[in-house]
Amino acid sequence: MERSDEVLFYVGTYSPVGEQGIRLCTLNRSTGDMRVLEGTSGIENPSYLAVNHAGSVLYAVSEKDEGEVQAFAIDPGSKVLSPLGSIRKTEGGAPCYVSISPEEDRIFVANYSGGNVNVFPLSADGSILEMSAQIRHTGSGSRQDRQEAPHPHSVIPGSTGDRLFVCDLGLDQVIIYRQEEDELVKQAAVDLPPGSGPRHLTLHPSGKWAYLINELNNTVTVFAKDEQHDELTVLQHVSTLPESYIAGSDDSGADIHITPCGRYLYASNRGHDSIALFLIDALTGLLEPADWQSTGGRTPRNFAILGGKLLAANQNSGTIVSFHIDGDSGRLIPTGNELEIPTPVCVKELK
């Protein structure tokens, strides 16, 4: 199905169970044009997706009060999804993130309103086995409107699947766990400034640094990362918004990604509805703000870098907009192409 000038990707949405909540789409590498090829129904609010390296299995959370996670087999030819194995309950509400271990023998789920993090082993065919471990956070943060309780928002594997970085928006902490047999053991907790609201974390290709987007105070935090023990040390906090801009109640940080070359970091701003570009210092890992590009829509909850392009998923305007990434500067250049999909909230490349 895929031609040399095309990249395939899946889109997760907030959709009722009877609608096509996951869409299979294609991106033209040259023009930035996008098309919907297929849709998959049967899962409510598949708001976050993960695809294994072989491109044979897709995992999706079902973000609802009684959360679930589900596996789908990807047809080798058509790339159409079909349910694979049992649907697993996450024992927590609003699961909003799923990730795959480097060894691809487990998946990890963060439950936003449930306050818990799950570990699910995988069978040889990629289907999800019964939960093997979980941990529930306790406590609260400084903002009673958003931090009245723990809110794990993402779980990112470290150098190996035995270590996990959990960003808890409600606690203003990135908590590092080790998996020991059937338990998650807390190794360390890195405190963020009160009211930060840590959301998503991404690791630099060099392994030396980690970068965290904070939802509530619109900042990116830079960490030095110990490659052996996955320990984090704060190096810098930098705003994702222009200095001249006065943030309002609708402004919040959302997603964060680094180009494969390791030179450019992007962060999305909801409210300001932009993608911020930062230059990464090759020696120190510190960030220098360089540009802000409108996403051409409202509420860019998620975005992805694929095929030399950046695709911004504008949740509240129901569009995915493509941008060319300038190789010399990292700046985003609109391609003039957008794809209409209701409430797109996750874009994942099929490699």
Image: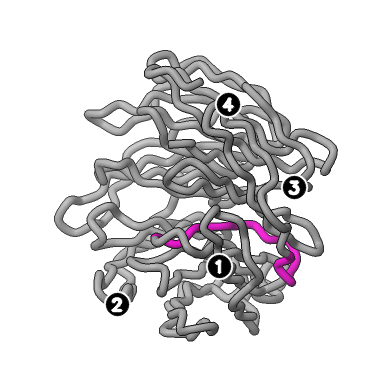
Residue type beneath disc 2: His
Please say if the residues under marks 2 and 3 sit with CB atoms less than 8 Å apart. Answer: no
Check the image and tell me how it is coloured.
one colour
Sequence-wise, the earlier of marks 2 and 1 is 1
Q: Which residue is mark 4?
A: 78
Note whether 283 is above or below 327 in the view shown: below
Regarding mark 3 in the picture, which secondary structure is present there? loop
Regarding mark 1 in the picture, which secondary structure is present there? strand
**Residues under labels 3 and 1: Cα distance?**
23 Å
**Residues under labels 2 and 3: Cα distance?**
36 Å
Residue type beneath disc 3: Asn
Please say if the residues under marks 4 and 2 sit with CB atoms less than 8 Å apart. Answer: no
Residue type beneath disc 1: Pro
**Residues under labels 3 and 4: Cα distance?**
24 Å
**What residue span does the magenta drawing correspond to?**
89-102
Q: Which residue is mark 1?
A: 121
Q: Quadrant of the C terminus?
A: top left
Q: Which residue is mark 3?
A: 45
* Disc 4 versus disc 2: nearer the observer: 4
Q: Residues within 10 Å of mark 2 (few under 14, many from 20)?
A: few
* Disc 3 versus disc 4: nearer the observer: 4
Q: Position of residue 23 (x, y in %)?
A: 65, 32
Sequence-wise, the earlier of marks 1 and 4 is 4
Identified at 35% across, 28% down, the residue is 308
